[in-house]
Image (cartoon, rainbow, N blue to C red):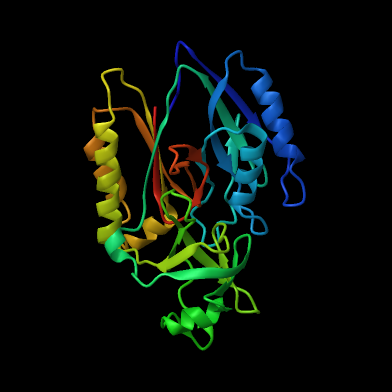
Amino acid sequence: MVLTGDDVEFGAAVSGPLSSEQDAPLCEMYGAASKRLRKEPVFIIAFMPLLYNTGGEVFLDILNNASGLPVFGTIAVDHTKDYHEAKVIFNGKAYGDSLSMIIVSGGVSPKFLIASVSDERALKQNAIITGSHGNILKEVNGIPAVQYMESLGLTKDGQIEGPGTIPFIVDYNDGTKPVVRAIFAQTPEGYAVCGGAMPVNSTLSIGSLDYNDVMETSGKIIGEVTEGLSSRGGALLLFSCVGRNYALGLRTGDEMEKISHSLDGKIPFVMAYSGGEICPLYDRGDKLKNRFHNDTIIACLL
């Protein structure tokens, strides 16, 4: 996809190597890219690297603090089992530990949409996160995370079964829509390593993801997109979690085929599968808050 506009400017940049210990590479990148723009920036499209020791939410928080702008984007994945060849690409070069982004300014009004686990596929028995550190879930309802999982029948021999296949639904209780988190691993202490922040005092519930739900939520978000189309044209960016693709089983192309058929001729669009989705949500005051998601399909309608 090529994005262009008579009254729009783009500031593209790539960072230096990233780590959880410093935010300078991202702050320097944003500062340098934003200075090249003649108009006020509106939002950021970000492409983050997949780093095993640092969650994408860390980088999102840095961008949020540096810019104060809505951030939309994805984490890179590939077709290997452990994603070890995942790269971010910028100006013909591939980077394993750098973030690239586009700052968009001028006459553009993005509309952000998300769809994740359907309400009817979430357990109604909510719990409270009582202990966590970043993306590490330590305690639920005052008991260790693995013990809570055991009470739900989600463990075997003391280990959480099927990491990556159990969607956690986390409500920040701030008026924004709940976000979905995937479990990536279990620590020796019995903690759950999740795909995004698990704030203390948030409400937690367990959902399920299958073929029918992926197809249903894809239809929901495309319905919202088509309702928001205008005669001015525009463009659409779509990212769907790779976990949703796994849930399709052997019919791995069905979600893309449905979206392509639904949007054919209506609007130019690009869709890709994602290792983590970045999309703002509206709070009670109708203000945008940047959020990181798993097992979710996100859209940016321009």
| Outermost residue, bottom side | 157
Percent across and percent down for residue 15 are 69, 36
- Please say whether residue 103 is visible from this viewpoint: yes
- Location of residue 194 in the rendering, given as x and y in whole percent from the top left corner: 55, 63
Whole-percent x, y for residue 242 in the image: 43, 54
Left/right placement of residue 35 relative to residue 276 reads right
Q: Residue at x 35, y 32 (%)?
A: 269
**Based on the displayed image, in which of its 4 quarters is residue 118 positioned?**
bottom left
Query: Which residue lies at the image location 57% right of the left edge and 15% below the top edge?
Result: 39
Q: Is residue 278 above or below residue 51?
A: above
Compare residues 206 and 76 and report the one nearer the observer.
Answer: 206
Left or right side of 37 for 282: left
Is 240 situated above or below 147? above
Q: Residue at (60%, 26%) from the top-left corner?
A: 12
Q: Quadrant of the N terminus?
A: top left
| Quarter of the figure with residue 32 | top right
Q: Residue at x 25, y 60 (%)?
A: 212
Q: Is residue 99 visible?
A: no
Q: State the count of labels.
A: 0
Name the foreground residue: 127 vs 161: 127
Q: In this view, which residue lies farthest toward the front? A: 285
Asked if residue 5 lies left or right of residue 247, the reply is: right
Front one among 40 and 50: 40
Image quadrant containing the C terminus = top left
Image quarter for residue 301?
A: top left
Q: In the rendering, at what x and y percent does residue 108 appear?
A: 44, 21
